[in-house]
Image (tube, rainbow, N blue to C red):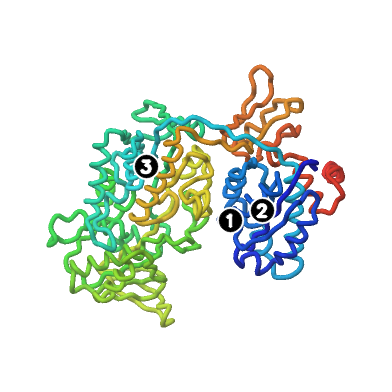
Amino acid sequence: MTNAARVGVYICHCGINIAATVDVPAVTEYAARLPGVVVARNYAYMCSDPGQAMIQKDIAEHNLNRIVVASCSPRMHEPTFRAAIAEAGLNPYCLEMANIREQCSWVHPVGYPTTWKSMQLVEAAVAKVTRLEPLQTRQVSITPTAVILGGGIAGMQAALDLADAGFHATLVERESNLGGHAARFYRTFPTQELAGVLVQDLLERVNQHPRIRVMIETEVTDVSGYVGNFRVKVRRNEEFTEIPAGAIIVATGFETFDPHLKPELGYGRYPQVVTTMDFEHAFAGREDSKQPLVVHEGSQQGGNASLAEANDTRMDHQRIQIENPKSIVFIQCVGSRDQSVGCGGNGSSAHSYCSRVCCMVTAKQARLVRETFPDARVTVFYMDVRAFGKGFEEFYDQARQDGILYRRGNPSEIIKRGNSVLVRAEDTLLGEPVEVEADLVVLAVGMRPRPDSEAVAQLLKLSRSSDGFFMEAHPKLRPVDTSMAGVFLAGCCQAPKDIADSISQARAAASAAMIPLMRGQVQVDAATSFIDEELCSGCGQCAEICNFSALSLHPLRGKMTVNAVLCQGCGSCAATCPSKAIMVHQFTLDQVLAQMAALSGWDDVSVALEKVETV
């Protein structure tokens, strides 16, 4: 233990999240008796302004040089407490957090064992914090430009916000047109505005903006560098270009669920069975409201007109002309909230998630049918109706008032019957089978990750959630950030969402990207790996395991070196190194062994080291 260590310990109630299960006063009293602890306190919300002020006051009055906060996960509030102690003049890396919420109160029942475990975690944190060394953060200069991957509405909005703020932005789109899926919608919900007008406005502003560079039919092949100094290599017409960027916004979008994976619904076999995207395309293509609808099966795939035209030609036999239908059936949750459907190559284990937009798309299209064919019977089979947004519930209520029949049911199959089809389902409210004959069946297909999501994740070192979408750094506190500093998420590549939410997230991502761009410098975390060259053999195994390309072999010394700007401090290299030549600041061997000694009741670190060496 460092002789000069003067530790302050602060236990958080987290409202009742911790206090309802853990005896917080007892933990505080226990902490006060630990070696090196000068003061121990508890408070309802340590992350609040009064809680932070309490820590800052004690640092000044008691000359504290180490701080332990026992509260929630460090992922939530470690930056908060680091900033607080730094403001009080203490090095921000002289902080250790004990997670007594997720690791104690949330996973154990009320009782002494839960409180005792909290005491042990606090004791381990105190043992470690006395061995922490102050670290110095570094400032890295930034290239004041941004690259946006994806030219849908999210990508275009992010590019516009960045460009309007004075930064140059490069918009990279794989397809031959901007606009993405939204460019092929007919109307939006709940206002029933023409989607084409919205998209066209964005297109004109993007194409006319002097600080936006648009690169269509362009594919990203490599991304190197680090926050503030990325180098994005793209390929266009077999010609390669390298684009410098201080920040990257990923807005690569989604693809719709392939209903061929549900063969019992007859998509691809019966022209009377189409998707919501097929149906939307049919409405958008009408020049006159008196014209019959011509629906092409297969037009939901892809994101631009040229591909749609190719599908229309290839699937010409799978089309239906609708003039005076007697019955139209909509089926919701096709490819959503379905554990039986596999990933289909997109990286997700199942489609158990809600795609969020399908209920409202169905309500919108059902109302369009009612306007176009007022004599038709319109039936919607649904699991649950989720009308969560502003004006959505009223829109759904209006659909029912218009005479659209909503039946809570689970369709099992669709079969041919003459020129129509027969939908067989179970009415889950009545508990009995039901059959509905229809001239047209519209499948509300959900969203799923694009097939190239894994390739993009590999290029940018991004994490993906179990459903295959890109994962944000924190769902509440950092919803547009990623685990890779300087890379942000916008739109449906992160999760299913509607146009309004996509634009909101795009503007948030642009705002987050502007912070380092405006500063001109970015602070790099100092808790990175470092190498003991006396032990390093230069084998290179650490470089192979590193996801951030932070390790390389020195050409003269034959030893591995760490690029501290690229290193994210994950510790993979330290676990891989056969000679134990790599350690991570804040997680050195003596610090970890001190925690082990405290948790296991061993007398000191030397005993812990003997135990580890024996194992």
User: Which residue corresponds to mark 2?
Assistant: 69
Report helix, strand or loop for mark 1: loop
Quadrant position of the N terminus in the picture: top right
Tell me which label, 2 or 1, sits earlier in the chain.
Answer: 1
Alpha-carbon span between mark 1 and mark 3: 37 Å
Q: Is residue 113 left or right of residue 11?
A: right
User: Which residue corresponds to mark 1?
Assistant: 47
Residue for point 34% across, 40% down: 159
Alpha-carbon span between mark 2 and mark 3: 42 Å
**x%, y% of residue 316?**
24, 52
Task: Using the image as rendered, state which of residue 439 and residue 487 is in the foreground.
Answer: 487
Task: Using the image as rendered, state which of residue 34 and residue 612 is in the foreground.
Answer: 34
**x%, y% of residue 459?**
49, 37
Report helix, strand or loop for mark 3: loop
Is 492 drawn above or below residue 407 in the view shown?
above
**x%, y% of residue 139?**
54, 32
Tell me which label, 1 or 3, sits earlier in the chain.
Answer: 1
